[in-house]
Image (cartoon, grey):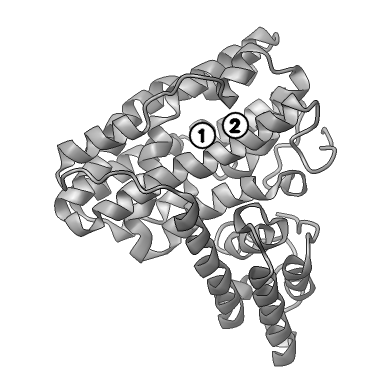
Amino acid sequence: MKFPRARGDASGALLRVLPRRPDDIEASELFDLQQAIARAVAGSDDLLHDDDVQLALDMLYELHYTGFDEADDGWEWSPALLAGRSLIEAAFERALRASVPMPELPEPRADAVAAALFELTAPTPGPGLARTIEREATDEQAREFIIQRSIYTLKEADPHTWAIPRLRGRAKAALVEIQSDEYGGGRAERIHAALFAGTMRALGLDDTYGAYIDAVPAITLASLNMSTMFGLHRRLRGSAVGHLAAFEMTSSLPCRMIGDGFRRLGYGVDVTFYYDEHVEADSVHEQIAGRDLAGGLVDAHPELLADVMFGAAACLVVDGMAADDVRSAWEAGESSLLGSAVRS
């Protein structure tokens, strides 16, 4: 992945350090980096919409994914960078817990947990982003939506995969089953991230991993950062499971709407295949995620019930914020992107 453009002091400080080798950095420079991050966090009045802080966290997390073309792999476990990351994560988790209403907790049994999750994720009436794309989005807006989603979907499934070694038994088997489908069942061309890349190419967009990082706003980054944070921390494994359960339970119907929206705009199967595939796949995944993954985890570890429900609620709230911001921009006749996205 190419380096993004800085959005403030914290991301700028990272971009001054990452292109160099860890052994070539003076301790004073790493201290300055940590101070820049601390100031950015302390000075933020809305961390979920803070472009500088969310981009800095995204960059720090990216070191655990594919990394950056010009960053030494030794930065992944740099104590200084991990210390800076922990400053952001602590504030980010506080902001999430302050922003996400905690749902009522069911009995700590698999059937009760599944029922509660299905109730929490039930479709709601009224306008939504998928319905907007289905019925009225312009071609430009539909392409903007794909750009917004590319930040997560070109690494689809990876944030939740971190949780696999943290689980055992029924929950582990359920997560592996879901992720196996996400990764194409052993066929590279069927990996869901690759299917989405095909949609991007068919729309004339750049399918390079991270190509549009400079175009998406903080809340889009926050949605991805949240799922990565849940996945990377063992103590948050319950939230990772709840997040994935809500993600799968709210996918099938919107994917049908989005596919229909692109058909309305005149596009064919080369664009819609990714979404058509998810209509069927996620209708199966939601049952596995609710009953065997989330329910199975709580059956084995009832002390994780609140974490599971929080992760599910956080998925709905933060992704809802991102969707509302996109729709608000469109209703105002504006782009939802930070700048003009360059077409390939």
Q: What residue type is labelled 1?
A: His
Mark 2 is surrounded, within 10 Å at the Cα level, by few (under 14), some (14 to 19) or many (20 or more) other residues, namely many
Question: What residue is shown with label 2?
Answer: 196
Which of the image's four quarters has the N terminus?
Answer: bottom right
Q: In this view, does 236 lie above or below 120?
A: below
Q: Nearer the viewer, residue 118 or 64?
A: 118
Q: Examine the rendering and report whether any part of residue 89 can be seen.
A: yes
Question: What residue is shown with label 1?
Answer: 192
Q: Are marks 1 and 2 in contact (CB under 8 Å)?
A: yes
Q: Which of 59 and 205 is in front in this view?
A: 59
Q: Residue visible at 37% across and 55% down? A: 163
Measured as percent of width and height from the top left, residue 291 is found at: 22, 36
Measured as percent of width and height from the top left, residue 245 is found at: 35, 39
Which of the image's four quarters has the C terminus?
Answer: top right
Q: Residue visible at 68% across and 86% down? A: 31
Q: Secondary structure beneath disc 2?
A: helix
Left or right of 231? Residue 289 is: left
Measured as percent of width and height from the top left, residue 57 is found at: 62, 62
State the CA–CA distance, disc 1 to disc 2: 6 Å
Measured as percent of width and height from the top left, residue 147 is found at: 70, 35
Q: Which amino acid does label 2 sit on?
A: Phe
Q: Residue visible at 79% across and 32% down? A: 335
Mark 1 is surrounded, within 10 Å at the Cα level, by few (under 14), some (14 to 19) or many (20 or more) other residues, namely many
Q: Is residue 124 above or below residue 85?
A: above
Q: Quadrant of residue 114?
A: top left
Q: Examine the rendering and report whether any part of residue 243 can be seen.
A: no
Q: Which of 182 and 295 is in front in this view?
A: 295
